[in-house]
Structures are given as C-alpha cells and as structure tokens.
Amino acid sequence: MDFVGLHNVAKHVIYLQEASEAALSTVQSLREHHEQDIKDRHTPVTDGVQDALRYRQSLFQSTQLRLKSLDRRMQNIIALVRPSGHS
C-alpha cells in the first residue's frame, strides 16, 4: 500500500477543510453584512440574494461535514496500514 500517498491525500483533505472553513466564514459575513444593509428594504431581489447566500452557506456546511468524515476515514486507513514499528 502507498503509505506516502495516503498521507498526501490526508494532507489535501486538511487543506480542503481549511479552505472550506474560510469560504463558509466569508459567506456568513456576507449574509450578515447584507442583512444589515437591507434592514427593512426587502424586495424580491434582496430576498433572492439572501436565499442564494443561505444556499451557498448550506453547501459549505455540508462540504465541511463530508471532509470531516473523509478525514476520519483516512486516519483509520492510515492507522490500519501503518507499517509495524512506526507510530
């Protein structure tokens, strides 16, 4: 089994988790700023922007959940295939 390859995949999963977290934070900030900006001026356009931002937020949240799950699976695989004598 390609032990180095598994570690590289695990490294990329961590990178994707960080990127997803940053993107989610950005979307949340955009939503908050937009909500403050429109206050009582709800129109179909402003409501559509909020809907689009909520949708993007949910996509990044589900991506984070999938990446956490993938990270746990990768760690389990690495633990199983770790050559004896390595910790």
Image: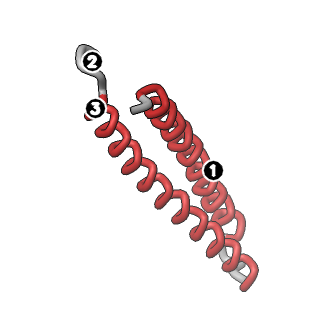
Q: Residues within 10 Å of mark 1 (few under 14, many from 20)?
A: few
Q: Is residue 10 above or below residue 26?
A: above
- Residue visible at 59% across and 43% down? 19
Comparing 50 with 67, the one in front is: 67
In percent of width and height, residue 14 lies at 49, 37
Q: Residues within 10 Å of mark 2 (few under 14, many from 20)?
A: few
Q: Residue furthest right?
A: 45
Chain-order first, disc 2 or disc 3: 3
Q: Is residue 75 left or right of residue 57?
A: left
- Residue visible at 68% across and 63% down? 34
Q: Amino acid at mark 3?
A: Ala
- Colour scheme of the picture: secondary structure
Check disc 1 and report the residue beneath it: 26
Q: Quadrant of the N terminus?
A: top left
Helix or strand or loop: what does disc 2 sit on? loop
Chain-order first, disc 3 or disc 1: 1
Comparing 82 with 12, the one in front is: 82
Q: Is residue 64 above or below residue 45?
A: above
Q: Is residue 3 above or below residue 71?
A: above
Check disc 2 and report the residue beneath it: 87
**Number of the front mark, 1 or 2:** 2
Q: Is residue 84 left or right of residue 77?
A: left
In percent of width and height, residue 40 lies at 66, 77
Helix or strand or loop: what does disc 3 sit on? helix
Q: Amino acid at mark 1?
A: Thr
Q: Amino acid at mark 2?
A: Ser
Check disc 3 and report the residue beneath it: 79
**Is mark 3 in CB contact (under 8 Å) with mark 1?**
no
**Number of the front mark, 3 or 1:** 3
